[in-house]
Amino acid sequence: MTEARYLDDAEQYEFEATVEAVRGTNRVVLDRTYFYPTGGGQPHDTGTLATDDVTWDVTDVQKRDRIEHVVAGDAPEPGTTVTGHVDPERRRAHTRYHTTQHLLSATLLDEFDAETTGNQLYTDRAHLDCAYDRFDGDDLQTIEAHLNDLVSADLPVRWYTLDRAEAEATLDPERTRLHLLPDSIREVRIVEIGDEDDPFDRTACAGTHVKSTGEIGTVVLTGRTTQGTSHERVEFILE
């Protein structure tokens, strides 16, 4: 089983690993990795795997029963020691956008009783879908101002794991949304933003995040669209 090190440190961009297996001709399974696989609205990392003699571009990362790194060309042989390099700019963008999505989800739930139903982020933009009839221009201005106040407050962001039964018994189900996780997951990763005793947001999440909201930058809401009956999509960028 590949050690998913990206969950521990989102700012580690270089690492050494051993090729455990190759699937097909170009899907590399490592004993450990800092490459993030596509999931939860966050796209995969890109970068390279390299030995002293050869460099392979990592073009995709997917999590199936194990984490597979799709490389350009024929993959290195099992047993090969490689150095992984994660593209830091792409990772950093995803990390900032993902943390902003948490702030937006919590704000919409607190201020509009609007539960998040989906999200997708990129390196230069993101959107969030929620259960709400329709936001107007004043709503968007209010939400944007609140988000930037949270950024200015430079709230700490932390993550830890909990036994699922304990999480279900002690945490707010509306925020953690543990019911969305498969029953097979018995240990959950919790991300908190704000004061430890009374966090602004606490939810189950397996994405990468900044260490404090001040790292996000200015949030700009660029628009909203209706997504079917009683659903809205809010779009935003970071400056």
Image (cartoon, rainbow, N blue to C red):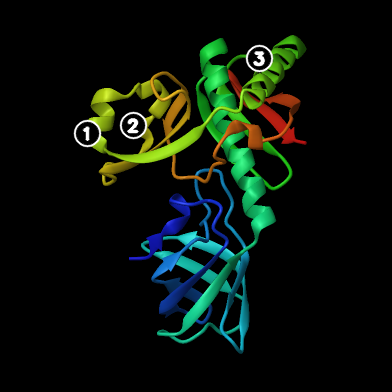
The residue that label 2 is drawn on is 179
Q: CA distance from mark 2 to mark 3?
A: 26 Å
Instruction: Identify whether 89 is placed above or below 171.
Output: below
Question: Which residue lies at the image location 67% right of the left edge and 27% below the top edge?
Answer: 234
- Name the secondary structure under disc 1: helix
Q: CA distance from mark 1 to mark 3?
A: 36 Å
Residue 167 location in percent, x, y? 28, 31
Residue 58 location in percent, x, y? 60, 70
**Residues at badges 2 and 3 in contact (C-beta under 8 Å)?**
no
- Mark 3 Cα-neighbour bin, 10 Å: few <14, some 14–19, many ≥20: some
- Name the secondary structure under disc 2: helix
- Per the rendering, the mark at residue 165 is 1
- Name the secondary structure under disc 3: loop
Depth check, mark 1 against mark 3: the one in front is 1
Instruction: Identify whether 1 is placed above or below 92.
Output: below
Question: Which residue lies at the image location 54% right of the left edge and 30% below the top edge?
Answer: 102
**Residues at badges 1 and 3 in contact (C-beta under 8 Å)?**
no
